[in-house]
Image (spheres, rainbow, N blue to C red):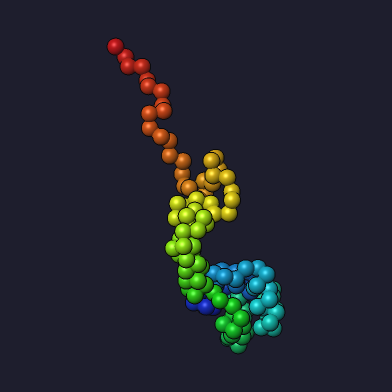
């Protein structure tokens, strides 16, 4: 198992797919990293040499912000929006969609499981 940027990437997958397991690296970025490191994109991670792994790591460190540092930046940006009380910051604070989606009916991913308001269910007739 290879470790890149503090993440253990799966050894059975191709290099360009395995790199997407690192936070901040998507398919397009992974393709660019593999090309710049001069590694065959279809080779499996278990077949990589230590030199190839170190070249990939060097390219990532030189050109990309990933994992913990990227998460700190994103969290800081959201905190800034909340602090200045912008519309997007208020939506983040209320756990609602921030990019204009409707929230009257959908938005279940952001709002969570539907909670039925009490008192709306019909009463069951009691046996006498």
Name the residue furthest left.
128
Report whether residue 72 is seen. Answer: yes
Query: At 47% from the left edge and 55% from the top edge, which residue is drawn?
Result: 90
- The one nearer the camera, 93 or 126, is 93
- The one nearer the camera, 92 or 23, is 92
Determine whether 110 is above or below 116 in the image.
below
Determine whether 3 is above or below 50 in the image.
above
Instruction: Tell me residue 94's x, y (percent).
Output: 45, 51
Name the residue furthest bottom.
51
Instruction: Tell me residue 53's x, y (percent).
Output: 59, 83
- The one nearer the camera, 97 or 126, is 97
Report whether residue 1 is seen. Answer: no
Q: Quadrant of the C terminus?
A: top left
Instruction: Tell me residue 79's x, y (percent).
Output: 45, 64
Query: At 37% from the left edge and 20% from the top edge, which residue is drawn?
Result: 124
Is 51 positioned to the left or the right of 67 in the image? Answer: right
Tally of numbered tags = 0
Query: At 64% from the left edge and 73% from the top edge, which residue is drawn?
Result: 30
Is 24 positioned to the left or the right of 128 in the image? Answer: right
- The one nearer the camera, 117 or 45, is 117
Name the residue furthest top.
128
Query: At 70% from the left edge and 79% from the top edge, which residue is drawn?
Result: 35
Determine whether 78 is above or below 42 in the image.
above
Q: Residue 105 sits in which quadrant?
A: top right
């Amino acid at each position: 198992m290879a470790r890149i940027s503090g993440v253990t990437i799966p050894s059975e997958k191709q290099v360009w797919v395995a790199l997407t397991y690192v936070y901040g690296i998507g398919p397009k970025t992974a393709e660019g990293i593999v090309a710049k490191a001069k590694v065959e994109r279809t080779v499996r991670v278990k077949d990589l040499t230590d030199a190839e792994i170190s070249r990939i790591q060097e390219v990532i460190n030189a050109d990309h912000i990933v994992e913990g540092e990227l998460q700190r930046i994103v969290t800081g940006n959201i905190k800034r929006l909340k602090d200045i009380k912008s519309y997007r910051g208020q939506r983040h604070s209320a756990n609602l969609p921030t990019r204009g989606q409707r929230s009257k009916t959908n938005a279940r991913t952001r709002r969570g499981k539907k909670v039925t308001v009490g008192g709306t269910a019909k009463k069951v007739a009691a046996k006498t």
